[in-house]
Image (cartoon, rainbow, N blue to C red):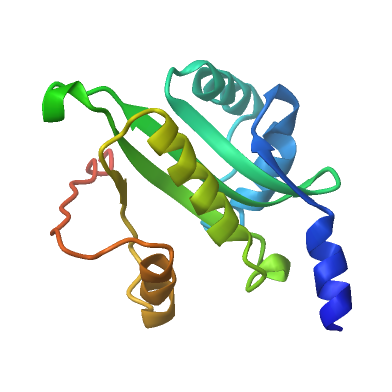
Amino acid sequence: MAQAARDRAADIVIRPASAGDLPTLLALYRHLNHDDPDMDSGFAEDRFAAILAHPGMTIFIAFEGDIAVSSVTLVVIPNLTRRGASYALIENVVTHTDYRQRGLARALIKTAIARAWEKNCYKVMLLTGSKDPATLRFYANCGFTQHKTGFQIRRPAAG
């Protein structure tokens, strides 16, 4: 069994998203937000093209064959403080339910952090809405510390 898990991990390829990856990425995102309504396909294609063209934004995907099984989004943001050093944000950390507990999200997060350091970012931030102690431990084990307070405001529903 351990050998099978190792063999299977060897079949995983991590790379930045490219134009043909939209269908498998959208299928993967169903494992992040189960209740999200389906997007109009034309709108999804336009949005994905904008993401791919956005300077400093990269979606890293772990593939098994042609199937996206885990991903993270990294955004490198230019800055005028810290002597102009950029900072980065990691968002949309998701792993397909059948591929969890295999180190894929950790490998993707490490890939994203390495890219941020290559871009001379002075910090990488990650927010999670999860209160699950295992999730918080996971992020801590990836090197993140919980020492700031995060706030957000969401757009009110159209009424």
The answer to whether one can see residue 25 in this image is yes
Nearer the observer, 121 or 63: 121
Q: Where, by quadrant of the figure, is residue 129 drawn?
A: bottom left
Residue 90's x, y, as percent? Answer: 40, 45
Instruction: Residue 143: give x, y in percent of width and height.
Output: 37, 62
Image quadrant where residue 147 sits: bottom left
- Image: 35 above or below 55: below
Nearer the observer, 66 or 23: 66
Left/right of residue 109 with respect to residue 102 in the rendered view? left
Residue 95 image-quadrant placement = bottom right
- Whether residue 69 sits left or right of residue 117 in the image: it is right
Q: Where, quadrant-wise, is the C terminus in this rendering?
A: top left
With respect to residue 100, does 15 lie above or below?
above
Where is residue 99 drawn, in percent x and y?
71, 66
Residue 28 against residue 103 in the figure, above or below? above
Give the residue at x 14% y 21%: 80
Nearest to the observer: residue 111 or residue 47 = 111
Is residue 96 left or right of 51 when viewed as pictured? right
Nearest to the observer: residue 140 or residue 127: 140
Query: Residue 21 in the image: x percent, y percent?
Result: 72, 33
Q: Residue at x 61, y 30 (%)?
A: 40
Residue at the image position 59 percent from the left and 28 percent from the top: 44
Q: Quadrant of the N terminus?
A: bottom right
Q: Is residue 36 visible?
A: no
Please give left or right for residue 125 compared with residue 100 in the image: left
Q: Residue at x 56, y 22 (%)?
A: 52
Q: How many marks?
A: 0
Relative to 127, say whether 90 is above or below.
above
